[in-house]
Image (cartoon, rainbow, N blue to C red):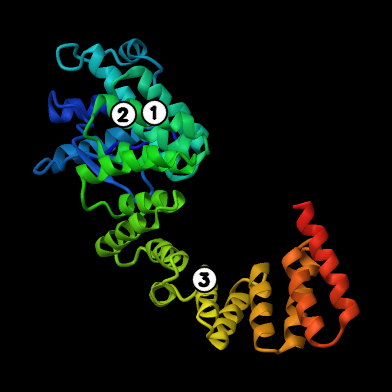
Amino acid sequence: MEIISPAGQKLSHKALIFMNKIIGTELAVSFNILTLQPGGMLIRRPPELPGRSRKIKKYSILLTIALLSPVPETALAAKKQYGMVNPGKLGGAEISRSLSLDYYNRGTSYIRTDQNDRAITNLTRAIELNPRFVQAYLNRGHAYNRKGQFDRAIADYGRSIELDPKLTLAYYNRGTAYFKKEKNREAVADLSRAIELNPNLAHAYLNRGSAYYAMEKYELSIPDFSRAIELNPDLVYAYLNRGGAHYIMGKYDKAISDYSTLIEIDSGFTLAYFDRGLAYYRMGELDRAISDFNRVVEINPELTDSFLHRGDAYSKKREFPLALADFSMVLERDPENPMAYFGRAKANYRMGRYGKAFADIFRAGYFWLRR
């Protein structure tokens, strides 16, 4: 049985005492199984307790009553509140650990519902009651990470590693936090350690590849993205990022292959159409490029760059009225976009509208200087 404090509900320590009486001297929440969650959060799950259905039924009835009681703030308060505790079976240190688990479970529940401030409060209390509670540091770090407080997250992940140097998820999470802070060398080091500990962690390869990508080490990023895809063929950002690395390296056909696979997985993935359109443009396949930019406009008409690049493709096809319309659309949304003025100037010039072309060239130069 697992005792979890649902969001907004206080779970009484009395439930632990009832379970202690039912199962004997074994603590109610005897956690020993760790599971890795996709969101980077460690969840502790208790072992199964077979052959005790009667006692569990009795416990469930008592637990229903116990849920009405508040959680005591300290082990001493718990002893005073529940005088039936047998010190020989459940001592003060054990009560503190049990209370710590209460706060841990409640904090973890708050993370699941994106109530990160409440999560931090409860996980901090869990740590105060049990300063060596590795998973509490790990999950508090996760809450800080979600709030964008990366330095605090990194500190908590570091403390987790001090307490358990082989905790894969701590290295993975700290590496990801370093990546978000643009500390890519540190990110690579931590993610490499996570991979050493668990060579099948697809997201570690994805994030290390992304760190290499940010460092412009594209030749190192591609093998990591490929390994991530081997481990998880539906990992869309691995295709997107590998396609980006191929594009930058001038391997447009390989980039198009990655973007096309991504679109097969998720037909509404806007960036895949956009990036594939750019690759088609580079290869001179203008009709396919325009088709992809059209799809982007259908899915997300607010993405201004799709009009800009479609206008450029129309201009290359000498379809100048369509190009003018796209460049003008960009300028309605972004009146200081020099690329749109430059593109419209070229289209006007090709159409013999020299005065408008020179005016747009002047505006393009002006706004480029301002940037």
The answer to whether one can see residue 290 in this image is yes
Question: Which quadrant, please, contains the N terminus?
Answer: top left
The answer to whether one can see residue 70 in this image is no
Quadrant of residue 305 within the rendered picture: bottom right
Residue visible at 19% across and 11% down?
Answer: 87
Pointer 1 residue: 156
- Between the C-alphas of marks 2 and 3, the distance is 40 Å
Q: Nearer the viewer, residue 306 or 315?
A: 315
Q: Which mark is residue 275?
A: 3
Q: Which mark is residue 335?
A: none
Q: Amino acid at mark 3?
A: Asp
Q: Amino acid at mark 1?
A: Asp
Residue mark closest to the camera, 2 vs 3: 3
Q: Marks 2 and 3: CB-CB under 8 Å?
A: no
Q: Nearer the viewer, residue 367 or 304?
A: 367
Q: Amino acid at mark 2?
A: Ser
Q: Secondary structure at mark 2?
A: helix
Q: Marks 2 and 1: CB-CB under 8 Å?
A: yes
Q: Secondary structure at mark 3?
A: helix
Q: Position of residue 306 (x, y in %)?
A: 63, 72
Q: Which mark is residue 160?
A: 2
